[in-house]
Amino acid sequence: MGLTLEPLVPGGVLAIDAGNSKTDVALVAADGTVLGAARGGGFQPPVVGVEAAVGSLARIVARAAAQAGLAAEGSAAGDGTPLAEHTSACLANADLPVEERQLEAAVHARGWARTTRVANDTFAILRAGVDEPRGVAVVCGAGINCVGMLPDGRTARFPALGRISGDWGGGYGLAEEALWYAARAEDGRGGPTALASTLPGHFGLPSMSALIEALHLHTIPGTRTYELTPVLFATADAGDPVARTILDRQAEEIVALAVVALGRLDLLEEETDVVLGGGVMAARHPYLMDALTARLASRAPKARPRVVTAPPVLGAALLGLDRVTAPPAAHAALRAHYA
């Protein structure tokens, strides 16, 4: 049930975009004005538990409320008065509907708004990149995910749980694949590729065997393998066929996700935006972009690919304004704030 007290920001939206590495919160008035905003650390309920993770959100919400001149912890004076009409929270690690429901209950229990909706954070990227809640987004960052939505509330989504749910790609997948080919090139199990020298060379090492040892013994932290994705791009730019094969596979994966999502929403025969987000897409690597654009044009000719540059918290806020049926002028004002 929703809260009955009049919100401190009538008709307003508390927007939360919480990723693995950072969280953005914005308190938005009914007319689209951003009253307060704050940024904090990542949102990782699998690591710290749901309550602790939502507790970390509470501290960021408090700072956004304070910037708006309102009290912290979701109420004006500890009397349970909600901050806003609706909380729109797009959260990392909300990969399955059951996880969304669990997180939605925990967020709503904080009393920040009369109503609450939790969705996977990929929906924020999608909504940030489209003029109405209609389209498909493929996010290719550290990992890969895809969602789609229609104004009538229908959605398309994938579990996005890694290899167990059939996923491949993103920065980690690309780096891992490049290492695999480079290792086999050096020891003779595979064909030649310049990756066998460019990957270890990035770390100042003479060979793949030295890089393998350094990663295995953690003298180079495994987290630094993400640095190898730009090296893969540069090696592909130099014409290496193996590096280009890896990028071709990434293009295939992106297009496969987009086409399936478009098909589920009956959008293959309509002009539809396909929003591309995440660090790999933001790099706009020419070979990868050309490869995926050509494949998408072949399989979904009416799809319009576009790389999103707006912050995901904008998408979370727009989803909130959709939910409270704010007028178009409010949407426009909000977009102007983040332009």
Image: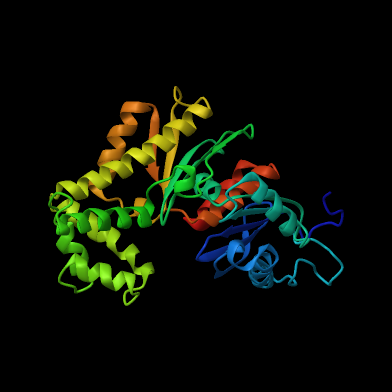
Left or right: 295 in relation to 53:
left
Residue 117 to residue 58: above or below: above
* Residue in the image at 32% along x and 74% along y: 220
Foreground residue, 338 or 262?
Answer: 262
Closer-to-camera residue (94/339): 94
Colour approach in the figure: rainbow
Q: Nearer the viewer, residue 171 or 336?
A: 171
Q: At which x and y percent is residue 303? A: 40, 31
Q: Position of residue 159 (x, y in %)?
A: 54, 44
Image quadrant in which you'd find residue 92: bottom right
Q: Residue furthest top?
A: 269
Q: Is residue 11 visible?
A: no
Write down the quadrant of residue 324 in the picture. Answer: top right
How many numbered circles does the render carry? 0
What residue is rendered at 46% in x and 53% in y?
310
Quick check: 273 left or right of 182? right
Most foreground residue, 264 or 26: 264
Question: Residue 219's spot in the image, x, y percent?
Answer: 32, 77
Instruction: Tell me if residue 126 comes above or below residue 231 in the rendering.
Output: above
Q: Is residue 34 left or right of residue 242?
A: right
Residue placed at 48% from the left, 46% from the top? 164
Place of residue 24 in the rendered image (x, y in percent of width and height, measured from the top left)? 56, 63
Residue 312 visible in the current orientation: yes
Q: Residue at x 19, y 74 (%)?
A: 204
